[in-house]
Image (cartoon, grey):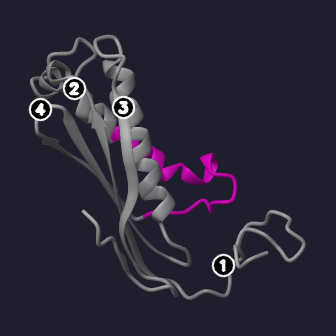
Amino acid sequence: MSGLSHFDDQGASRMVDTSQKPETLREARASGLVRMQPATLKLIRDQGLSKGDVLEVARLAGIQAAKRTGELIPLCHPLPITAAAVDFAFEGDELLHISATVRIFGRTGVEMEALTAVSVAALTVYDMCKAVDKGITIERIRLEAKTGGKSGPFQRSDP
């Protein structure tokens, strides 16, 4: 079925068999943006929300999500990831940049784990801030880079 690895020749869904793949060091980095009112971003920066430190809660949520991606995405392998990090940067007065890096020594990549970490971290920011800013948007979640595996490295070239 057009080379999509999660479908067999008859079009049925399947989990990819990785048992014959060699174990290699694999890493993936993903990013996303959370857009909000400047006053909301200031509350996050100054830890002024009554729910607590938004970024630390979102960091933990993102790391936990990376570890549990195989439970969320039906055909993802449950993976014993060896490292997961979620980082934040303030961009201007209304954007929070989230990045996640996930690493494994294994037979399959961790792109989905990095993307899931960013997604859940962004959703956690929304959840913690929705009382003061219901107009928050989550934008541009994407794979930035990956290394390891048969397909080789990938590095996004557009800004």
Q: Which mark is residue 93?
A: 4
Q: Which residue is disc 3 drawn over?
A: 137
Q: Specify whether residue 61 is in view.
A: no
Residue 52 appears in which quarter of the rendering? top left
> Which is more N-terminal, label 3 or label 2?
2
Cα distance, mark 4 to mark 2? 18 Å
Q: Residues within 10 Å of mark 2 (few under 14, many from 20)?
A: some
Q: Residues within 10 Å of mark 1 (few under 14, many from 20)?
A: few
| Percent of width and height locating residue 109 | 50, 72
Contact flag, marks 2 and 3 (Cβ < 8 Å): no
Residue at figure coordinates x 55%, y 63% from the top left: 79
Cα distance, mark 4 to mark 1? 45 Å
Nearest the eye: 150 or 24: 150
Residue 85 appears in which quarter of the rendering? bottom left
| Percent of width and height locating residue 72 | 61, 46
Q: Nearer the viewer, mark 3 or mark 1?
A: 3
Contact flag, marks 4 and 1 (Cβ < 8 Å): no
Cα distance, mark 3 to mark 4? 14 Å
Farthest residue toward the front? 158
Q: Which residue is disc 1 drawn over?
A: 18
Residue 65 is covered by the magenta coloring: yes
> Which is more N-terminal, label 1 or label 4?
1
Q: Is residue 141 left or right of residue 93?
A: right
Q: Which quarter of the figure is the C terminus placed in? A: bottom left
Question: Is label 3 in a helix, a strand or a loop?
Answer: strand
Cα distance, mark 2 to mark 3? 20 Å
